[in-house]
Image (spheres, rainbow, N blue to C red):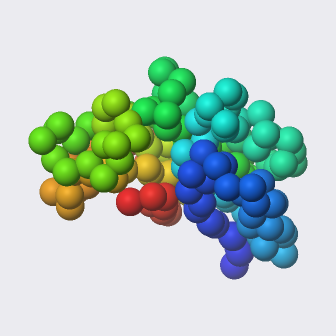
Amino acid sequence: MTEIFIATYNTLMCLYPNSIKSIRGLSELGDKSEHKILCFQEIRNINFKRDLADILKKVLPKLNSSFFLYDKPSRDDLGLATFSDLKILIEQKIPLPKAPKEYYNPQSYLLKEMPQCGALALTFSLGKKRLRVVNVHMDVGGGMKHKFKQLKHTVENIAGKADYEIYIGDF
């Protein structure tokens, strides 16, 4: 049997001093497993000046990486990253429907508009099998009805077949 360490971490744009140390620690937890997959949310705009993509690549240099960075580099549009030692066969980037403005948004005092959230679906080679891991970051506002709408949208927009499938992230 193959052992895979899989974890998710919302970096909160690494606004906290120990965020990078936490990412290193999370990676080290998976070192004893045969394979590891690390999923990150909110990787846009560290200190509002540069993306975390380059920093994550330096912190996790031995892992394959895939990023879904939205077009508009601002606090209003966040991003996703997935790192793994497994070979990536298929990569899909799925923008999710935004919550209507009338929904309660606890971030409204920080954001000019609802953030663009999304899903990063990667299908990996796992011997003769295919493992799909879907890293999802959903709106904080909009309630459960909107979250189900976003999840349904994700499932309906994934192409290809996989033997195993895992949905992980910030729901």
Camera-side residue of 66 and 110: 110
Q: Residue at x 61, y 53 (%)?
A: 11
Count of numbered circles in the view: 0
Is residue 27 at all visible to an observer of this figure?
no
Asked whether, in this view, residue 169 is left or right of residue 85, the answer is left
Residue 8: percent from the left, percent from the top? 58, 62
Is residue 8 at all visible to an observer of this figure?
yes
- Quarter of the image with the C terminus is bottom left
Residue 129: percent from the left, percent from the top? 59, 58
Asked whether, in this view, residue 142 is left or right of residue 19, the answer is left
Q: Residue at x 38, y 36 (%)?
A: 111
**133 up-or-down from 88: above or below:** below
- In the figure, residue 117 lies in which quadrant? top left
Residue 2: percent from the left, percent from the top? 71, 73
Residue furthest to the left: 102
Camera-side residue of 158 and 1: 158
**26 up-or-down from 75: above or below:** below
- In the figure, residue 30 lies in which quadrant? bottom right
Residue furthest to the bottom: 1
**145 up-or-down from 87: above or below:** below
Residue furthest to the front: 109
- Quarter of the image with the N terminus is bottom right
Q: Residue at x 84, y 75 (%)?
A: 32
Residue 151: percent from the left, percent from the top? 29, 52
Q: Residue at x 84, y 48 (%)?
A: 59
Asked whether, in this view, residue 79 is left or right of residue 100, the answer is right
